[in-house]
């Protein structure tokens, strides 16, 4: 297939992606979507866009549907993205450790659009730097999830290119990574054991009864429209402990969507203490 998606095909792909993942591809991204789908057509020797669209909706084509979702997501990430968030995170951990009632409680954090794990592993570095080796005896669990399966495979390997470490102070690179003969930087295995990665679609509530002190939901809502944002914010709200924090991407606004969070500072929110499980609609 040499040509790009025509406007009807684009609309059909748009609707399917939106229905599955809540991702809204605007019309100006038609060429990007065309190129991404074209690669899957080539890889699977499928003759037409409509044939491929039908194929990925068949119940026995779950593997190809996953390959399609992998191909249409944007997975850009790197360690210590947005320094302001990491300063806030460190202060929040320090404050918690200054509270005798909370200092021995385990710390649980959700990296809700984890991509290749740079965000989850940045958390572990900050925690070790703040609490000391072995996190000073405090239990630490970082849970990373993503819609894309192939980025999670990378996260489980914990291998990164130099690009992902461009914002990381060299002394931390030296301390927490080992370079292999493929020019990859391998994240410290002992620390990595505190992070687990699982595929999860943010449009769905997180299964199970996990609760988190902090949710990082960064640089994913830019791909969602208002209703999808409300859905994912509600799902994040429901798994945060009262008083827990939500951190979103710097360019992501919670304006004009209904949610139950309290504004703390730009792109940082908290769940009100004593908040009910389901958020009361509130606008900030
Ligand atoms: C740009 S990356 C952001 C990674 C990281 N949070 C950061 O800020 O560096 C966005 C990630 O969101 C994931 N994503 C997109 N839609 C999703 C959905 N519906 N459910 C879960 N993850 C999704 C993509 O696969 C991608 O890895």
Image (spheres, rainbow, N blue to C red):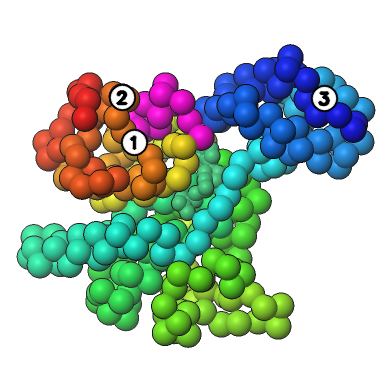
Verify CB contact (< 8 Å) between mark 1 and mark 2: yes
Quarter of image, res 90: bottom left
Q: Secondary structure at mark 3?
A: helix
Distance from mark 1 CB to nearest ligand 1 atom below 8 Å? no
Determine the residue located farthest toward the left in the rendered image: 100
* Residue marked by disc 3: 49
First reached walking from the N terminus: tag 3 or tag 2: 3
Q: Residue at x 71, y 22 (%)?
A: 10
Q: Would you place residue 220 above or below residue 278 in this image? A: below
Q: Report the Cα–Cα distance between label 3 and label 2.
A: 36 Å
Graded by Cα atoms within 10 Å as few (under 14), some (14 to 19) or many (20 or more), the crowding at tag 1 reads some
* Residue marked by disc 1: 253
Q: Secondary structure at mark 1?
A: loop
Task: State the image coordinates of residue 32 (x, y, percent, origin top left).
Answer: 69, 37
Task: State the image coordinates of residue 84 (x, y, percent, origin top left).
Answer: 30, 59
Front disc: 3 or 1? 1
Q: Report the Cα–Cα distance between label 1 and label 2.
A: 8 Å
Nearer to the camera, 188 or 92: 92
Region rendered in magenta: 223-235
Nearer to the camera, 158 or 170: 170
Left or right: 194 in relation to 139: right
Q: Residue at x 38, y 71 (%)?
A: 125
The numbered disc on residue 256 is 2
Q: Residue at x 12, y 40 (%)?
A: 273
């Amino acid at each position: 297939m040499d040509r790009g998606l025509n406007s009807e095909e684009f609309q059909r792909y748009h609707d399917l992606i939106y229905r599955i993942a809540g991702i809204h591809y605007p019309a100006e991204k038609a060429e990007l979507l065309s190129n991404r789908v074209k690669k899957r057509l080539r890889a699977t020797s499928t003759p037409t866009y409509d044939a491929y669209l039908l194929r990925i909706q068949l119940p026995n084509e779950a593997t190809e549907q996953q390959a399609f979702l992998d191909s249409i997501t944007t997975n850009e990430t790197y360690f210590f993205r947005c320094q302001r968030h990491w300063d806030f995170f460190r202060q929040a951990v320090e404050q918690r450790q200054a509270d005798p009632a909370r200092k021995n409680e385990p710390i649980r954090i959700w990296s809700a659009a984890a991509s290749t794990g740079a965000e989850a592993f940045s958390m572990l570095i900050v925690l070790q730097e703040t609490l000391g080796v072995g996190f000073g005896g405090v239990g630490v669990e970082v849970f990373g999830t993503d819609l894309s399966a192939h980025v999670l495979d990378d996260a489980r390997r914990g291998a990164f290119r130099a690009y992902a470490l461009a914002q990381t102070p060299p002394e931390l690179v030296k301390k927490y990574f080992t370079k292999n003969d493929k020019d990859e930087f391998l994240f410290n295995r002992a620390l990595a054991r505190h992070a687990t990665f699982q595929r999860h679609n943010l449009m769905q509530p997180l299964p199970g009864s996990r609760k988190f002190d902090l949710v990082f939901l960064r640089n994913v809502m830019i791909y969602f429209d208002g209703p999808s944002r409300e859905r994912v914010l509600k799902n994040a709200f429901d798994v945060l402990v009262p008083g827990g924090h939500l951190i979103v991407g710097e360019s992501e606004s919670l304006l004009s969507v209904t949610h139950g969070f309290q504004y703390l500072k730009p792109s940082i929110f908290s769940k009100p203490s004593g908040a009910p499980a389901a958020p009361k609609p509130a606008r900030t």
